[in-house]
Amino acid sequence: MVIDYSIWVWLPLLLATILAFTQQHKSSLVLLGIYLIGALIAQKINILGISIIILGLAIAYKTPTLKRNWQIVSYAFIFLWCVALFLHLAPGFNNVKVLDQVITGPHSIPFTMYLNIDKPLIFFGLLLSYPAILGSKLTLNRKAILFTAIPLFSLLLIAWAVGILRLELTIPYWWWLFLLNNLFITCVAEEAFFRGFIQQSLTKHFGWLVGITIASLLFGFAHIGGGLLLVTFATLAGIGYGLVYHYSSRLWVAVLLHFLFNFSHLLFFTYPLMNHYR
């Protein structure tokens, strides 16, 4: 595990994310600004990267007030901006490798993890351009969420049964770093993009079945680097997260279930895969 003084850069980001979920948007944006200034000072982002972020956030801020035709163009830009950040295609960012080929257990393949500067910004851009991503205050359908969570977590057992994973109880020394990174960066950004933005936008125009299906297929395809079998399991997991978002009407519930799924994978199974799978 490689950690230096620059880890403080992510602290205001974590606080900004929490405040955003509690509807304290002004305070959240102030902390986001501190995060970006800190990243610039720590040389984790350069002037070009800052310019790309400011441009994206500025367009996102103006999007809800634009006329319909210009709003469509603006949302298309925001979509491409998010994809560029998600795939780390935007220049000017120096994402930090904190875990390099670590082994979670004797039967697991090596695992590398980065603390991303770019990816967590997706959440804030979407929140400015499409505030509805956080969901509504409708009553939670707790029974439906429970019945969705059971088959969702069963995917880990199915992956074990077909030989992708193996039972392996481990608590790696870097579990706390995985928790912070996965919960506040990975899961928040992915759920905001795939469920809050794509699924909800499609649901609004074509119904919830279409919204969940397309968002889940795109979520699965985003894992193409792990092979077609991983794409299949990610798509099925995406359906689970999509249903949880649909039945809860709250983004934080989908984020929490997504994180608990990933953390259960880390603690109870080979992570990320069995060492003879590849």
Image (spheres, rainbow, N blue to C red):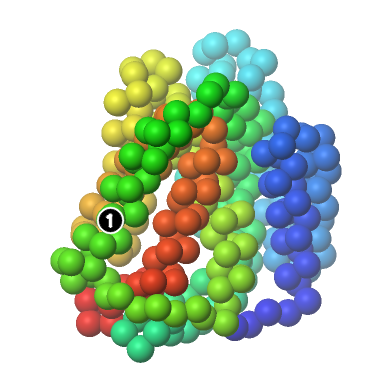
**What is the residue that sits farthest to the bottom in this orientation?**
106
193 or 145, which lies in front? 145
Dot 1 surroundings within 10 Å: few (below 14), some, or many (20 or more)? some
Q: Is residue 55 visible?
A: no
Q: What residue do we see at 68% from left, 79% from top?
A: 3
Q: Position of residue 137 (x, y in %)?
A: 60, 24
**Image position of 112 (left or right of 234):** right
**What is the residue that sits farthest to the left in this orientation?**
162
Where, by quadrant of the figure, is residue 228 drawn?
bottom left
**Image position of 96 (left or right of 269):** right
Q: What residue do we see at 55% from left, 22% from top?
A: 138
**Image position of 30 (left or right of 132):** right
Where, by quadrant of the figure, is residue 110 drawn?
bottom left
Q: Position of residue 145 (x, y in %)?
A: 41, 37
Q: Position of residue 115 (x, y in %)?
A: 60, 66
With respect to residue 230, does 110 lie above or below? below
Query: Looking at the rendering, in which quadrant would you find the N terminus?
Result: bottom right
**Image position of 22 (left or right of 84):** right
Q: What residue do we see at 61% from left, 54% from top?
A: 184
Q: Is residue 187 visible?
A: yes
Query: Looking at the rendering, in which quadrant would you find the C terminus?
Result: bottom left
Q: Amino acid at mark 1?
A: Leu
With respect to residue 50, does 197 lie above or below? above
Judging by the rendered image, the residue that carries numbered circle 1 is: 155
Q: What residue do we see at 47% from left, 84% from top?
A: 102
Q: Position of residue 230 (x, y in %)?
A: 27, 59
